[in-house]
Every structure is written in C-alpha cells, then in structure tokens.
Image: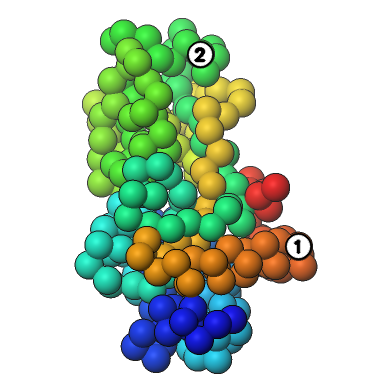
C-alpha cells in the first residue's frame, strides 16, 4: 500500500463502493434493516479494513448505472463485470468470480443448441447494459436483442412478447425455468461473466493495489469461503 494508492482509493476519507443491486447472487438487501449483505458487501468491508477505513456502499439498480458512476466520480471502487466497453472508463482487476451465462427457450421451441440461437428472426430478451447484453451485442450477427431495464423485466418481456429466447445468468435461469412449464435451459454457456473490481481509469496507483488485493483474496481462499458462507450456487472462483 502506497500513500498515493490510499489517497486515490479514499479521497473522501471513506471507501465509496459502487454496488450493482441487480446482481442478486452477490448482494441482497435485508428486508428488515435495509442492510446490504452478500459476497460483494463482505469483500468491500475487507478492502476497507485493509485501508484502515470504512466502506460506504452506494447502490445502483444495474451494472450499467454502476459503470456510469465512473464518469461522474460517484464511487472509488465498483464491483461489476469486466467488459471491454466499460474498460474505456474503468481500470479493472482480473476477475475474482465467474458466473456462466446461457439461454432459456420456451416449451415447444425448435432451438436445441447455443449455436442455433444466432439466426435471423430469433428474438432474444436481455437485461439492458448487463455484462451479457454487452457480450451479445458484440458477438451476435443475426438474432435480434430485445432489451428491458433489469433482469426481472427481461423475464417479463420474454413472457409478454412471447420471445424466442431469454438470455441470463445460469443461476437465475434455473429459477425461471421452474416458472414456465416445458421451458428448457440450453446446455453449455455462451460466456462467463467476469466479476471484477474497478476504479476510475485515471487512478493508476489505486488500480495496482486492487489487482494485488484480488490476487490475494483468491489465493487465500477468501472468495471461496464467502461463496460457501452465503450459499451462492452456480458460480466459481475465477482462475
């Protein structure tokens, strides 16, 4: 830890942490107290402890809004998926955790494999500006993305408009498929969301410290322990 890194990470005296409230796997709000709990709040608290300060968790409805906060100085570190588009404004660490993303299709769908999704006329529901939406925007050639604000809204859009495919995080789709008789989750994944920690790109010393922090929390087993402690299913410690 250098004095410059600490100054860049805590310019207000606290560690201001941008949190994606839409990522139900890694952060949840206690219904009684409103306190944020989960893997991300615990990692933020550990980072703040090492910096000798406290973490101020700043919630955003989705990952896109967290990313926007890098431009406005709304936070000092943000916990979101690392994507090339976001990296234009944010210096990311390597991933500390991976979440597979795949597709769900409705009952009677002729689509059997991931490769069959990217075809003309196929309409895919997705959560706008999520990491997997950004990935699909870069990689799909023929299918049409239909965007909704947030993961629950993308499910509603899929059902209401009778779309061909619902894209999403595998753990979420496992819960959604139970709500739709005859629906199927396609085997495999089209990508694995790389959950990382970022800081505004002009904070080089902060970025270097965060890279060391992520390497340590993986090697020490902290990430694995938090996944187990919070009972998070369908995710892996990033290699």
Between 18 and 150, which is closer to the camera in this rendering?
18
Q: How many labels does the image show?
A: 2
Secondary structure, mark 1, is: helix
Image location of residue 157, percent across then percent down = 27, 34
Q: In the rendered image, which residue does mark 2 sit on?
A: 115
Task: Determine whether 134 is above or below 63 in the image.
Answer: above
Is residue 43 left or right of 131 when viewed as pictured?
right
Is residue 133 left or right of 115 when viewed as pictured?
left
Disc 2: CA contacts within 10 A as few (<14), some (14-19) or many (>=20)? few
The answer to which quarter of the image holds residue 202 is bottom left
Secondary structure, mark 2, is: helix
Which residue is pictured at 54% across the width and 47% down the height?
Answer: 194
- Point out the tag, 1 or 2, that comes first from the N-terminus: 2
Residue 168, disc: none
Which residue is pictured at 49% across the width and 66% down the height?
Answer: 207
Is residue 235 left or right of 138 when viewed as pictured?
right
Which residue is pictured at 43% across the width and 22% down the height?
Answer: 106
Image location of residue 142, percent across then percent down = 32, 13
Task: Determine whether 141 is above or below 92 in the image.
Answer: above
Q: In the rendered image, which residue does mark 1 sit on?
A: 219
Residue 152 seen: no
Image location of residue 175, percent across then percent down = 52, 42
Q: Locate the N terminus by quadrant.
A: bottom right
Image location of residue 239, percent across then percent down = 70, 47
Which residue is pictured at 56% across the width and 78% down the height?
Answer: 47
Between 175 and 139, which is closer to the camera in this rendering?
139
Q: Residue furthest right?
A: 220
Residue 124 seen: yes
């Amino acid at each position: 830890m250098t004095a410059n890194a600490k100054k860049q990470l805590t310019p207000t005296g606290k560690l201001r942490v941008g949190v994606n409230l839409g990522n139900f796997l890694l952060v949840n709000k206690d219904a009684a107290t409103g306190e944020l709990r989960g893997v991300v709040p615990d990692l933020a608290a550990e980072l703040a402890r090492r910096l000798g300060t406290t973490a101020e968790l700043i919630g955003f409805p989705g990952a896109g809004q967290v990313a926007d906060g890098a431009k406005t100085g709304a936070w000092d570190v943000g916990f979101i998926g690392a994507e090339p588009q976001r990296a234009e404004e944010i210096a990311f660490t390597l991933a500390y955790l991976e979440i597979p993303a795949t597709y769900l299709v409705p009952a009677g769908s002729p689509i059997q494999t991931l490769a069959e999704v990217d075809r003309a006329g196929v309409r895919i529901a997705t959560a706008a500006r999520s990491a997997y939406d950004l990935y699909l925007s870069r990689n799909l050639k023929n299918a049409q993305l239909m965007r909704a604000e947030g993961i629950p809204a993308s499910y509603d859009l899929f059902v209401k408009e009778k779309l061909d495919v619902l894209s999403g995080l595998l753990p979420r789709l496992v819960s959604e498929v139970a709500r739709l008789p005859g629906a199927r989750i396609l085997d495999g994944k089209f990508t694995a969301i790389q959950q990382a920690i970022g800081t505004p790109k002009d904070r080089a010393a902060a970025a270097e410290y965060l890279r060391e922090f992520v390497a340590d929390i993986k090697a020490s087993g902290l990430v694995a322990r938090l996944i187990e402690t919070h009972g998070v299913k369908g995710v892996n410690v990033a290699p």
